[in-house]
Image (spheres, coloured by chain):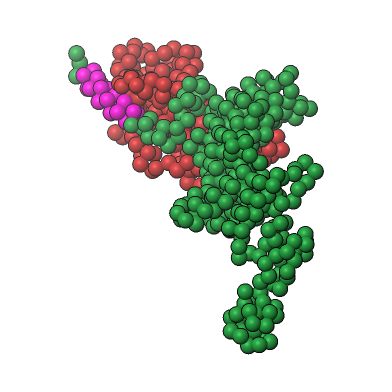
């Protein structure tokens, strides 16, 4: 064998060994950075997955524009297009918000399946709308509604949203209401009372254990207190389609007394009343008077000394 | 060494002095800018589309530049240009390495021009800064010219003139799926190239941070693979009967 050939072979062997070692390391590094690469490799589009996804997305938008509605006749086609899109670019959040939502009514199971995958996508881990929408489809479109799983997705959405944004407060609202529905189903109890119970327990657990539960994540217990106030008011305000039983009303009053003892609320209608008032101005029920001087019984709410008799901090 | 640089220099000078090349680069910029018109059809994703289009068009530019080598080498062999060069004190390996390096320079210059133009269009259109990942993705496309040029040289000397460009395109195309063979050491990355290692096109949009150490290592891999392919090409070329 010629010397030149030997040199060539040696160079090739060294290059192959170094190349394969580097390639394996780089392949692992790349998959750590972009986990979906492993699946994308199976689609031979010459590395143009993202651009192919863009084209597919525009074709999808164009196709959806040609439909008056997604119904039985076209839902399979829409799902096929969505699956192709997700295969090419699983990180496109718009695809889930504007694309998957279109099949939520016609095929909620498939919609949930696609949304669940998106919830587990590490690239979309900061997206709060996708888990919220997953829970929403579970409670609104799925027959029968899957409250148990939806609770986890509403919680995921609320946690991802950071909890402090005013716009995302409805995530917690859905979370508590879905938990209430679950409790009401399990205990066969009034749904509105179930919500009040859940909020009351949440408030108690935060007060006594200082745990950073849902309330803690929301920033403070003020939000829960506010929600509890509205939940109790809903119970105390019967409507055409809702008449609470006496037990429900009693329990609502009990919670109201425990939580809002210092808030001066009428136990009958959960309306706040002013200092010196003996009856609720909203329902006429007798209420416990506050803001009066202990000595002369004149209204002096907020004053350090009674301006009429000079008694110090003697209000009730 | 001087001979290698002389051949490389003549290769890239021959291409880079052609005005039509810059007209084609301008056409690529126009195509990139066309993405701005898709704001309605893409439901507001025109920014992402522009980034994707620039990366896609830059990759195609790189592939076309590399393909030119599969036409040029057989043509020089057929026309006797190569044989007259090889009659001088110049090794066949030097000739191939010179051609490969010259082609790489063409690739680097033209792809860098496409990338720079795309960044300018992006900056002017969206009044937004070019992110690090966007820059890195374009750099990786430019660097992918290294193994692709070596592949083109290999097929240009190993295959007939008509087959070489087709095989080169097919190998480049399917090498993006080589990740499926990552469990086969020596074959994966050593003999069969994985050009997907240079592909971070989606990351440019989603701003996935690419460590610079990765860029350095993937360049090293590209060089290793180019050395392997060029050595193999040289071995085949040394046994070839040139008129």
Residue located at (30% from left, 17% from top): B235
Q: Percent x, y for residue B40?
A: 71, 38
- Residue B76 in sight in this render: no
A131 on left or right of B92: right
Tell me if residue A234 is in the magenta stretch. no
Left or right, A166 with reference to B142: right
For image coordinates 60% across by 44% down, the residue present is A176
Total number of numbered labels? 0
Locate the N terminus of chain A and report the quarter of the image it occupies: top left
Residue shown at the point (58%, 49%) measured from the top left: A199
Which quadrant, please, contains the C terminus of chain A? bottom right
- Specify whether residue A124 is in view: yes
Give whichever of A154, B18 is nearer the camera.
Answer: A154
Left of B152 or right of it: where is A176? right
In this rendered view, identify the residue nearer to me: B72 or A127. Answer: A127
**Vertical arrangement, residue B149 with respect to residue A228, above or below:** above
In the rendering, at what x and y percent does residue B2 appear? 31, 34
Instruction: Give the quarter of the image for residue A264.
Output: bottom right
> Which chain is drawn using red?
B
Rendering colour (chain A):
green
Q: Which residues are magenta?
A: A4-24
> Is A261 in front, or is B161?
A261
Q: Is residue A69 above or below residue A305?
A: above
Counting from the top left corner in percent of width and height, residue A266 is at 70, 61
- Above or below: residue B202 compared with residue A267: above
- Residue B78 location (% of width, % of height): 44, 15
| Residue at (78% x, 62% y) in the render | A284
Q: Determine the image quadrant of residue A107.
A: top right
Membership of A7 in magenta stretch = yes
Overall secondary structure of the magenta stretch?
Answer: helix
Q: Nearer the viewer, residue A203 or B230?
A: A203
């Amino acid at each position: 064998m010629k010397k030149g050939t030997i040199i060539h072979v040696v160079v090739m062997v060294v290059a192959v060994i170094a190349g394969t070692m580097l390639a394996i390391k780089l392949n692992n590094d790349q998959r750590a950075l972009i986990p979906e690469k492993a699946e994308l490799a199976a689609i031979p589009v010459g590395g143009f997955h993202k651009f192919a996804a863009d084209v597919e997305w525009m074709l999808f938008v164009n196709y959806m524009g040609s439909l008056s509605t997604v119904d039985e006749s076209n839902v399979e086609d829409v799902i096929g297009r969505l699956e192709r899109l997700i295969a090419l670019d699983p990180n496109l959040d718009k695809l889930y918000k504007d694309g998957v939502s279109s099949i939520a009514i016609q095929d909620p199971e498939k919609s949930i399946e696609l949304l669940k995958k998106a919830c587990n996508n590490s690239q979309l881990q900061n997206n709060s709308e996708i888990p919220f929408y997953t829970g929403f489809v579970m409670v609104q479109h799925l027959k029968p509604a899957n409250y148990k799983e939806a609770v986890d997705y509403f919680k995921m959405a609320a946690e991802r949203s950071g909890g402090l944004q005013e716009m995302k407060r409805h995530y917690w609202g859905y979370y508590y209401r879905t938990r209430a529905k679950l409790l009401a189903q399990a205990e066969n109890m009034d749904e509105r009372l179930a919500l009040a119970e859940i909020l009351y327990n949440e408030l108690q657990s935060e007060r006594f254990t200082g745990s950073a539960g849902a309330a803690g994540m929301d920033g403070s217990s003020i939000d829960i207190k506010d929600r509890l106030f509205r939940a109790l008011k809903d119970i105390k305000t019967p409507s055409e389609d809702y008449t609470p039983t006496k037990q429900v009303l009693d329990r609502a009053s009990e919670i109201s007394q425990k939580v809002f003892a210092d808030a001066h609320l009428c136990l009958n209608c959960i309306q706040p009343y002013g200092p010196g008032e003996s009856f609720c101005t909203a329902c006429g029920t007798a209420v416990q008077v506050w803001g009066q001087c202990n000595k002369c019984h004149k209204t002096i709410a907020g004053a350090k000394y009674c301006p009429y008799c000079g008694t110090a901090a003697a209000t009730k | 060494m001087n001979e290698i640089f002389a051949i490389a220099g003549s290769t890239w000078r021959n291409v880079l002095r052609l005005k039509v090349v810059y007209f084609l680069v301008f056409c690529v910029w126009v195509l990139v800018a066309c993405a701005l018109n898709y704001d309605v059809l893409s439901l507001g994703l025109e920014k992402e589309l522009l980034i994707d289009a620039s990366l896609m068009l830059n990759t195609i530019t790189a592939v076309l530049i590399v393909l030119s080598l599969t036409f040029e080498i057989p043509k020089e062999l057929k026309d006797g240009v190569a044989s007259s060069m090889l009659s001088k004190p110049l090794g066949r390996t030097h000739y191939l390495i010179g051609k490969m390096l010259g082609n790489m320079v063409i690739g680097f210059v033209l792809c860098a021009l496409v990338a720079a133009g795309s960044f300018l269009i992006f900056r002017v259109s969206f009044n937004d800064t070019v992110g690090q990942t966007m820059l890195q993705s374009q750099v990786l496309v430019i660097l992918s010219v290294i193994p692709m040029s070596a592949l083109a040289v290999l097929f240009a000397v190993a295959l007939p003139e008509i087959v070489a460009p087709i095989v080169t395109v097919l190998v480049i195309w399917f090498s993006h799926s080589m990740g499926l063979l990552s469990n086969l050491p020596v074959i994966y990355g050593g003999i069969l190239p994985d050009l997907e290692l240079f592909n971070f096109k989606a990351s440019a949009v989603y701003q996935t941070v690419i460590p610079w150490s990765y860029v350095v290592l993937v360049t090293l891999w590209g060089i290793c693979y180019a050395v392997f392919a060029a050595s193999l090409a040289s071995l085949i070329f040394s046994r070839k009967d040139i008129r």
